Image: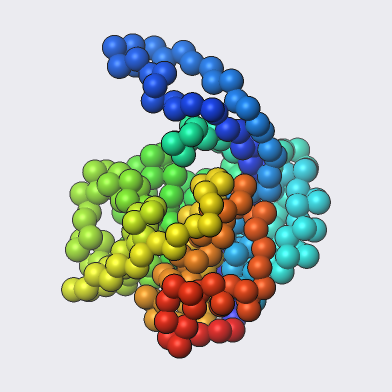
Amino acid sequence: MKHIVTGSIAFDYLMTFPGKFAEHFLPEHLERVSLSFLVDTMEKRRGGCAPNIAYTFALLGHRPYLMATAGQDFGEYGQWLEAAGVDVSLVRTYQDKFTASFFCSTDQGNSQIASFYTGAMAHAAELSFRTVGDIALVIISPNDPAAMTQYAEECRTLKVPFIFDPGQQCARMSAAELADGIKGAKMVICNDYEFELIRQKTGLGEDEILKQAELLVITRGEDGCSIYEQGTRTDVPAVQPREIVDPTGVGDAFRGGFMAGMAEGANYRVCAQLGTVAATYALEHVGGQSHSYTREEFDARYAQHFDASAAVTA
């Protein structure tokens, strides 16, 4: 049974600004902002929500399938993912396009300003689960909005359990698209800011979402995360990082860890704890795929913060 990770494949161009963005915005002139930030560093990293999630999933001893679209520049990236334990046989490449690109500047307060070039991601709706075979679980992470809506509909039709993870596409997707993605999901996951966007656009709060989905997980940065099931809320604290280097890909690492727990049959609290430890590793490195560990190293760190006897190891 396959675990399928869908979403964007991208290259990340990560820059650091030695100040705070907020100090340069003039409230009386917000209708005509014209700013250029001189950054100190820039790094090009392999990224995209789907590979980031799949990478952590693979680090924890599993072999997820990446189902996404990429451009003519994906060759080396695909080989690297295969070597890391991710199956890329479901990735479709388009030789007339470049892989999507994420341009992100982070300031001293960890605030970010970013732009995203769609590239080959615009073709994501051309992919389908109908030819994939037996599927245990799908995550629908940020991607072309039309593709995300299509994937959710296919999962419902094929009776495939799916996680709806709208992420940064909450700002782009309409109320109808967001509501459609939630309908019938095994799990809806978002951060606290994204949840408020969903609430404002759709009018759906925690209780209303749980009438349509089995589980709601809201991540809260340094305050950990909250797991909502019918009638219950479970809070899981964050793990203190050894150092904070870069927040890019931290949420994706959490999702990869959470999915690994689900694949291992762990309860949702343990899944969130696994995700929290995985997220902390990502926070301590630049980009979403520059960290690494063995499962034994991961489990040892998990045991420093949570009850290891409750966890399930692959």
Note whether residue 197 is visible: yes
Q: Which residue is depicted at the point 80% across and 51% down?
A: 75
Q: Which residue is depicted at the point 67% across and 63% down?
A: 292
Query: Which colour style is shown?
Result: rainbow
Does residue 308 appear left or right of residue 299 in this picture?
left
Q: Which residue is depicted at the point 81% across and 51% down?
A: 76
Q: 62 and 131: which one is in front?
A: 62
Q: Position of residue 176 (x, y in %)?
A: 32, 48
Q: Position of residue 194 (x, y in %)?
A: 35, 47
Q: Which residue is depicted at the point 34% across and 56% down?
A: 223
Note whether residue 127 is visible: no
| Quarter the N terminus occupies | bottom right
Q: Is residue 13 above or below residue 206?
A: above
Q: Position of residue 19 (x, y in %)?
A: 49, 26
| Quarter the C terminus occupies | bottom right
Q: Position of residue 307 (x, y in %)?
A: 42, 82
As drawn, the residue found furthest toward the bottom would be 309
Does residue 41 appear left or right of residue 205 in this picture?
right
Q: How many tags in the picture? A: 0
